[in-house]
Amino acid sequence: MPSVAEGVKIGIQECQHQFRGRRWNCTTINDNLAIFGPVLDKVVEYGSAEHHQCSPVQPQDYDLIHEGYDHSDTHNGKQPDALHDPQCPTGEVAMTEDMYLGSITTRESAFVHAIASAGVAFAVTRSCAEGSATICGCDTRHKGAPGEGWKWGGCSEDAEFGSMVSREFADARENRPDARSAMNRHNNEAGRTSINDHLHLKCKCHGLSGSCEVKTCWWSQPDFRVIGDYLKDKYDSASEMVVEKHRESRGWVETLRPKYTFFKPPTERDLVYYESSPNFCEPNTETGSFGTRDRICNVTSHGIDGCDLLCCGRGHNTRTEKRKEKCHCIFHWCCYVSCQECVRIYDVHTCK
């Protein structure tokens, strides 16, 4: 489904932005070692039969269809288009083992699951508001009493429906009674919750000559950068957990509890992990690390993007690079800008 694929790509792009100056920079499917790659591979290979495994989805799972939808026309007992796959029997969706990150349970994995889940919820919600999907539309539930000087109008974005689709997409295989599944489900939900938490009122003025005689408002998602910044903060403050085993009627079950009891326990909005991160200095096929060799570093920075830290103490190389740029631009009345082309020389520093 295009909006699901777009959502994962949005998540990847935001992950790359947030970690652009770190040793782990959210490397993607351009290489086989990618830690984020399996998530996108699942979407890219969506039309390939050998990559499919179908998971059952029960009709009651779609009872989240909100007031305002015409059930006789748009629901009709069928699963949403966002989940339908022609290669799967009716009532099932395509899933693959490669969707997730193997046995990795670090805070990087926590962020990946959260940002990918949020990206899917974001893209599906936007697709509904734009009228691109047939099963959903605007959210008509959150009306309430308007504020002074404005009234409800426009198309409020249905983040709850987007979260439902994201939940079916991301959580369908996370039903095992082990700690990794519990961790992934928690972080997926934290990502989706961030979308709902950041809905805000957006308003438009109507009137003659730009006046604001009438103002209509609706619920809107923020720019996804806001979500990325928020989840990056959650990554930095992620809660370390420990695994506990106990027996239930279905057998041995693994659960998670905070490692440090003197800290406030994590909420549904926090990210959790239970394995320490590698240093990502050297290539490692198990962790998806490419290492930092040949990465561009900032020779003047004392932070994580600086050559000392990013290069893991190996030192750095420096080369000169010529770049053509527009310069000496002049505005001419009326109305165009003319520029000259200049060649400038820059020093580029890369890790050894």
Image (tube, helix red, strand yellow):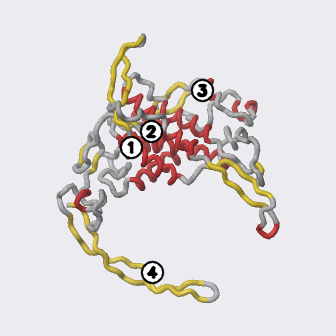
- Name the spot of residue 193 as percent of width and height, x first: 53, 39
Q: Quadrant of residue 305?
A: bottom left
Say whether disc 3 or disc 2 marks the residue closer to the N-terminus. Answer: 3
Q: Identify which residue, 147 or 90, lies in the foreground.
A: 147
Label 1 close to label 4 by CB (< 8 Å): no
Residue 326, labelled with which disc? 4
Residue most extreme to the top: 249
Residue type at numbered disc 1: Ser
**Residue tagged by mark 2?**
270
- Give the Cα separation between the discs numbered 3 and 2: 25 Å
- Name the spot of residue 194 as percent of width and height, x first: 52, 43
Residue type at numbered disc 2: Asp
Say whether disc 1 or disc 2 marks the residue closer to the N-terminus. Answer: 1
Residue type at numbered disc 3: Asp
- Name the spot of residue 208 as percent of width and height, x first: 82, 67
Residue 61, labelled with which disc? 3
**Looking at the image, can residue 98 be seen?**
no
**Residue tagged by mark 1?**
237
* Residue plotted at (77% across, 62% down): 212
Residue type at numbered disc 4: Lys
- Name the spot of residue 126 as percent of width and height, x first: 61, 48
Vertical side of 289 occupied by 271: above or below: above
Label 3 close to label 2 by CB (< 8 Å): no
